[in-house]
């Protein structure tokens, strides 16, 4: 007779008993009370947890993207989880949370690996990733400890995966043209890459979106790689993007260690959906640094060179900006500007500009007027696209004309004020000298 291990998880609404039999899958009903009490993480935002659901336990190896109900055991680095709305749920020991299994490589935080079973593991990202920590940055706390209760399954006990709700593939947009040629052309696309985590990529992307939107363009945005978090997506939306997608829409809570085929498929899927939405221009953020495995692979791919018209490269220091942009150019990508944390220092900006022919872009330079110059100066980045570049230039001259009209009006007001002041002084002098003030008779 097989040994039976029993564990009980006490919650306010009652008790759930999990019976684990070696080599067998145990399926139990997930009660509505337990589902309602659980805090659901951003990584699960696409999941429709409706109808009859089950908890699947036993001798099971989880896969990336599997939804799992876990209990918080001991708080560590992450004391909150982010929801799909951006709400940060405060965690307490004993809380139930629904997260996704996934891999993670974050040099500023954790390196993790996917667990081989449903034993105790860690919450390794605020967006809701369950995994096992391999190593961590010395400046952060140990990871929050969690215990899986069971994978969330459908009514038949089949484990659910976030990929079940991924966007459906779309064909590339067919460019409409009056000419006899009918070519499939991509929407103009600018990618934001960086030297590492926290180099200023998301901020640069958001200000770039702000400038493009203020210049009258309908902007679409996507985060191609990284670990799921609502902050970056909401930042881009707040900056003015009409539609923002991320890799969760492609079925991945995190893109670490996905294959090159999956990576390029994600790139293609998100690009096609943004194009189908009819945006004028696309801004992509590619996470981590250019030497991180997935980012390096994407930069070297034909997919990137054929579809990315220009790159804004974010760096933490001048050296990274100069040599990182040089490496990208060697991969066949056009770096149209340098941005990131180093641009907060004017001396660093001057030193960088003296070492490269790529323009250094502070956040202010990504404003509407400056971004028109940036795109116009690098118009070759759109040489293979149907793009209303003239509309940007016409907008630029319209702004210039408005400035001239305003200046002329202001000058007229100043001249009129000076003439009135001169007349007033003459009247005062006549009064002071006691002479009669005689106005010329009307003819």
Image: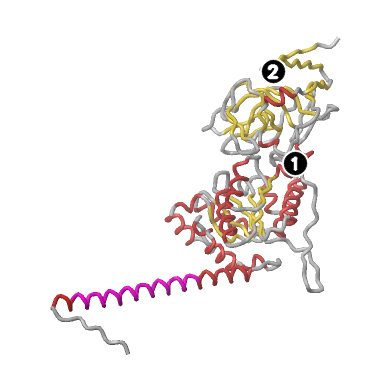
- In reply to whether residue 414 is colored magenta, the answer given is yes
How was the colour assigned to the protein in this rendering? secondary structure
Nearer-the-camera pick, 304 or 34: 34
Q: Residue at x 52, y 63 (%)?
A: 370
Distance from the alpha carbon under mark 1 to that under mark 2: 32 Å
User: Residue 128, how many percent across, how many down?
Assistant: 65, 33
The quadrant in which the N terminus is found is top right
Q: Is residue 287 above or below residue 305?
A: above
- Say which residue label 2 marks: 13
Between marks 1 and 2 in the image, the one whose residue lies nearer the viewer: 2
Image marks 1 and 2: residues in contact by CB distance under 8 Å: no
Q: Residues within 10 Å of mark 1 (few under 14, many from 20)?
A: many
User: Residue 141, how many percent across, how many down?
Assistant: 54, 28
User: Residue 104, how many percent across, how many down?
Assistant: 66, 37
Nearer-the-camera pick, 163 or 358: 163
**Helix, strand or loop at disc 1?**
loop
Q: Residue furthest top?
A: 1
Label 1 or label 2, whichever comes before in sequence order: 2
- Say which residue label 1 marks: 251
Nearer-the-camera pick, 42 or 32: 32
The quadrant in which the C terminus is found is bottom left
Q: Quadrant of residue 279?
A: bottom right
Q: Which residues are magenta?
A: 402-428
Answer with left or right where residue 110 lies relative to residue 66: left
Q: Is residue 382 above or below residue 302?
A: below
Q: Quadrant of residue 249?
A: top right
Answer with left or right where residue 34 lies relative to residue 427: right
Q: Residues within 10 Å of mark 2 (few under 14, many from 20)?
A: few
């Amino acid at each position: 007779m097989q040994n039976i291990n029993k564990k009980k998880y006490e919650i306010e609404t009652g008790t759930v008993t999990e019976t684990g039999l070696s080599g067998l899958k145990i399926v139990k009903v997930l009660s509505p009370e337990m589902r309602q009490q659980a805090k659901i993480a951003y990584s699960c935002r696409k999941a429709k947890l409706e109808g009859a659901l089950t908890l699947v336990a036993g001798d099971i190896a989880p896969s990336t993207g599997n939804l799992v109900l876990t209990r918080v055991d001991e708080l560590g680095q992450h004391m909150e989880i982010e929801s799909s709305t951006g709400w940060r749920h405060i965690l307490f020991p004993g809380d139930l949370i629904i997260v996704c299994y996934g891999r993670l490589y974050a040099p500023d935080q954790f390196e993790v690996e996917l667990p081989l079973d449903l034993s105790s593991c860690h919450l390794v990202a605020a967006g809701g990733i369950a995994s096992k920590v391999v190593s961590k940055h010395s400046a952060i706390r140990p990871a929050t400890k969690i215990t899986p209760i069971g994978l969330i399954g459908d009514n038949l006990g089949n484990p659910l995966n976030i990929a079940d709700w991924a966007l459906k593939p779309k064909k590339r947009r067919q460019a409409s043209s009056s000419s006899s040629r009918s070519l499939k052309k991509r929407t103009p696309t600018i990618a934001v890459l960086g030297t590492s985590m926290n180099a200023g990529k998301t901020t640069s992307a958001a200000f770039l979106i702000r400038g493009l939107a203020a210049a009258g363009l309908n902007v679409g945005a996507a985060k191609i790689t990284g670990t799921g978090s609502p902050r970056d997506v909401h930042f881009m939306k707040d900056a003015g993007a009409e539609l923002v997608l991320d890799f969760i829409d492609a079925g991945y809570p995190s893109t670490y260690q996905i294959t090159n085929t999956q990576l390029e498929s994600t790139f293609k899927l998100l690009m096609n959906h943004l194009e189908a939405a009819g945006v004028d221009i696309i801004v992509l953020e590619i996470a981590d640094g250019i030497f991180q495995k997935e980012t390096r692979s994407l930069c070297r791919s034909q997919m990137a060179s054929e579809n990315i018209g220009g790159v804004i490269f974010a760096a933490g220091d001048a050296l990274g900006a100069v040599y990182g942009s040089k490496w990208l150019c060697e991969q066949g990508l056009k770096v149209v500007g340098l941005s990131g944390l180093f641009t907060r220092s004017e001396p660093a900006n001057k030193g960088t500009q003296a070492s490269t022919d790529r323009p250094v872009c502070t956040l202010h330079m990504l404003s509407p007027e400056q971004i028109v110059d940036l795109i116009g100066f690098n118009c070759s980045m759109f040489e293979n696209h149907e793009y209303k570049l003239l509309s940007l230039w016409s907008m630029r001259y319209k702004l210039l004309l408005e400035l001239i009209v305003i200046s002329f009006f202001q000058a007229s007001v100043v001249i009129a004020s000076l003439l009135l002041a001169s007349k007033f002084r003459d009247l005062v002098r006549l009064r002071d000298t006691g002479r009669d003030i005689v106005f010329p008779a009307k003819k």
